[in-house]
Image (tube, helix red, strand yellow):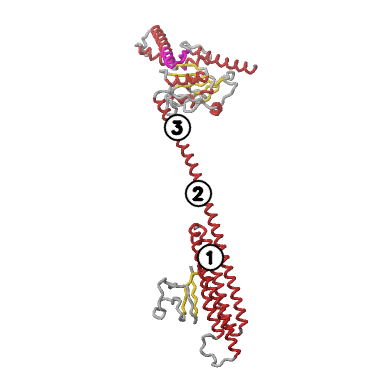
Amino acid sequence: MPCFRFSFATSMPYEYPFKTCVQCGQAPHNPSSDTSHPPAFQGSPSNHSGIILISCSDRTLLIMAWLVPVGIWAVSELFGFGRGDSAPNPTYAEIEARRWAERERDRAIRDLDSMRVEVAQLTQSMQSMQSRTLRFQQEAMSAAAAAQQKNQQEMRAMFDAVRAADAAHFAAESAARVATEESKKKAQEAEAERQRTLAAFEKAQKATEASKLDAERLQRAAEEEKKKAAEAVAESEAVRKVAENNVREAAAAKEDAERRLKDGIQPVLTPTPQEILAAQAKIQYQENLFHFAVAGRAGGGKSSLVNAFRGMSNRAAGSARTGVIETTLTMGRYSDPDERCQHVWYDLPGAGTIRIPDWQYFNAQGLYVFDCIVVLFDNRFTQTDIAILRNCRRFKIPTYIVRSKADQHISNIVREMGYESDDENADRSQQATLYMAAREQLVNETRHNVKANLAEASLPDQKVYIVSSSCLRAVAKGNQPSKVIDEIQLLNDLYTEAQARRVRQSGGVSA
């Protein structure tokens, strides 16, 4: 806080309120013997002159204390008291003037004593106000900057008032030398200045109260923000608990699903309406067509069977791609070459691969939107085939169990019987006999194996069609091959199924 220096001299004894050095805070000292500090006021009757170091916050009170000796000195100088050059034989007018001056001096002294009491009261009031101001500043640190700015403005105003009072003081001295009336006029001006100083003090007090109100308002706002922050923390804690609960439930569900899969229990997945519409859009489903899907494990000959149903060879243009390894990685859609047949054949990717686990095959391929599903297997009837049949039964989709590559399986059985097809001297009748025996063995073993697997899976028994792609292709083209097993019956049953669906649709439309 900036400080200001004021100097004055007086010839009158006066009791000053300062008991210690205002610069260093030490005990009173003799100004004649100690030159390291400005002289302190001790209240002795001797003359004093010195420098007072004051802070801006006390300048109002010190101005009032400073005016007391100045006033006394002014009256003494005006009327010549204390001078040693007075005339030895004063006139009557001079005596009357001196008496009048003494009365005025006594009245001035009484007024100054009253002013000193008022200054003391103002000092105590100012000290009390300062303590309250400090307490308010500690309670509202956020408003300290604004209050400090206002205090600086007030200090500048008080400093201006001090300068004005100082100017008035010197003007009063000059006027006192000229005339008493002029001195009274300057005294009135000094009183007016004092009133303005008091008004400035009251204004500062009101500003302090306003600062206190601002601090309280800011404190209330801070408490409100704290309350909102606590509510936000509580809300976030509730959200966190809900999220943790969801995570625990998901983890428990995952563990349960993994345990069930480990125990061989496959989950039942029901497609949503959106998934059904998406699957229909994927296969380009049309109500006026009959959609056949050929499904099964990888490497079972699905692509060759699709080509045989359409009467096409594996190398014909527009045929499904075939190969030793699994070549169908995406679903293939193939229309029937005969435009009169409103059939569409679908070659699906094989199940039991890393890409598609067995229990996800049915839903992953969208088999629930097809009109008929041909379940194809080659060597063994597996759990993948059981899963497809069980899901088809759940969705009421007609199914046909087909074992492919019958010609290869019969040839293998004939070789196991000891017949070599490369033997040129072999008896053809023996060949025919062995062929029929091998054919019957294949049919019986296949149907017995499928029946046992269906019974074990609690599924009803159904016919198993044993075919070879070459014979099926010839039948589809209208030929009559000699080594037919179930090819003709399979095509008749499939076409009958498609015709029955058209009849049901027609009946539903007419109804």
Residue 63 seen in the current view: no
Image mark for residue 151: 1
Alpha-carbon span between mark 1 and mark 2: 31 Å
Q: How many C-alpha atoms fall within 10 Å of the one at disc 2: few (<14), some, or many (≥20)?
A: few
Alpha-carbon span between mark 3 and mark 2: 34 Å
For the C terminus, the image quarter is: top right
Amino acid at dot 3: Glu
Mark 2 — residue? 226
Residue 417 seen in the current view: yes
Q: Does the magenta run of residues contain 460?
A: yes
Looking at marks 3 and 2 on the same chain, the residue that comes earlier in the sequence is marked by 2
Q: Which residues are magenta?
A: 448-469
Q: How many C-alpha atoms fall within 10 Å of the one at disc 1: few (<14), some, or many (≥20)?
A: some
Amino acid at dot 2: Lys
Location of residue 427 with respect to 326 vertically, above or below: above
Image mark for residue 249: 3
Nearer to us in this view, 167 or 436 = 167
Looking at marks 3 and 1 on the same chain, the residue that comes earlier in the sequence is marked by 1
Farthest residue, direction right:
510
